[in-house]
Image (cartoon, rainbow, N blue to C red):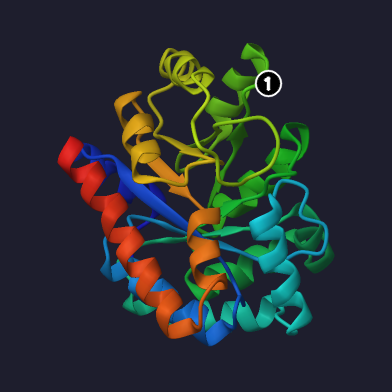
Amino acid sequence: MTSVSECFERLRSHARCGLIPFITAGDPDLATTEQALRVLDRQGADIIELGIPYSDPLADGPVIQAAATRALQRGTRLDEVLMMVRRVSPDLRSPIVLFTYYNPILNRGINQFLQDIAAAGVKGLVVPDLPLEEAEILLTPARNHGIEVILLVAPTTPSARIAAIAERSQGFIYLVSTTGVTGMRSQLESRVKDLLLELRGMTDKPIGVGFGISQPEHARQVMEWGADAAIVGSAFVKRLADSPPEKGLRDVAEFCLSLKSVINSAN
């Protein structure tokens, strides 16, 4: 398993846009999550984002919130998730990025948390409620553990703050395609195109676009606008939630392949 940065270097060397699926750990159960990670890896995911279920997920839309609630009700805990990741990560080509809120990190202690996720084979971290002013507390020790902390830019972020985020973000910059929470939308805001151009003028770091990308056409759109990766969450989570595990995994495999095919054909 390569690092997040190495993955983007490889994509750029082949002039390709990446695909980053998101799934929620423990929904419908951890055994299915483990299988889903293997399926996504086989079907061409470049990086996989794994959400740690949390009781107050402010950035998540209804589909992912419901998945997190179900996972917590079934008793899914961070230690069990990391045991599963530790088991599966040596077999994966795609680096795993954890999506978690700041409070669980603080509860465990920053260094202990980073040590634990690094030991499990995690390569990156997205913390949607991490204030930029406190980011350095996490960024420096994460670097020492080989974990890249990916920071988010929103459509409402002022230019000066965008520049500061772009400078500090590790691995890639997570560009939020819409104001509000994650979820499936019928179309993307054209503001994303302007933000991509603005970011390109500030940094040569890779940029992944997420929140609201639910169809192959959306992935093609952000790629044509200049994104280095399309991040797709709710659409994958919904497929796992709507069917028994065996069918859910088949649906995830087919959807991943359809996204990858569209991205590759447009490259």
Locate residue 229, reporting x and y percent.
37, 41
**27 over 51 or under it: above or below:** below
Q: Residue at x 60, y 21 (%)?
A: 162
Locate residue 183, reporting x and y percent.
60, 47
Residue 144, visible in the rendered structure: yes
**49 over 203 or under it: above or below:** below
- Give the left or right position of residue 89, taking residue 259 as reference: right
Q: Residue at x 62, y 68 (%)?
A: 115
From the viewer's side, name the closer residue of 176 and 247: 247
Q: Residue at x 69, y 39 (%)?
A: 136
SS for dot 1: loop
Q: Which residue is label 1 attached to?
A: 156
Q: Residues within 10 Å of mark 1 (few under 14, many from 20)?
A: few
- Give the left or right position of residue 76, taking residue 201 as reference: right
Locate residue 188, reporting x and y percent.
49, 29
**100 over 160 or under it: above or below:** below
From the viewer's side, name the closer residue of 30 and 102: 30
Residue 267, visible in the rendered structure: no
From the viewer's side, name the closer residue of 13 and 16: 16
- Give the left or right position of residue 193, taking residue 120 as reference: left
Please identify the quadrant where the C terminus is shown: top left
Locate residue 128, reporting x and y percent.
68, 45
Amino acid bearing label 1: Thr
- Give the left or right position of residue 83, taking residue 219 as reference: right
**247 over 207 or under it: above or below:** below
Please identify the quadrant where the N terminus is shown: bottom left
Q: Residue at x 45, y 43 (%)?
A: 171
Q: Please count the marks in the image.
A: 1
From the viewer's side, name the closer residue of 153 and 60: 60
* Quarter of the rendering containing residue 40: bottom left
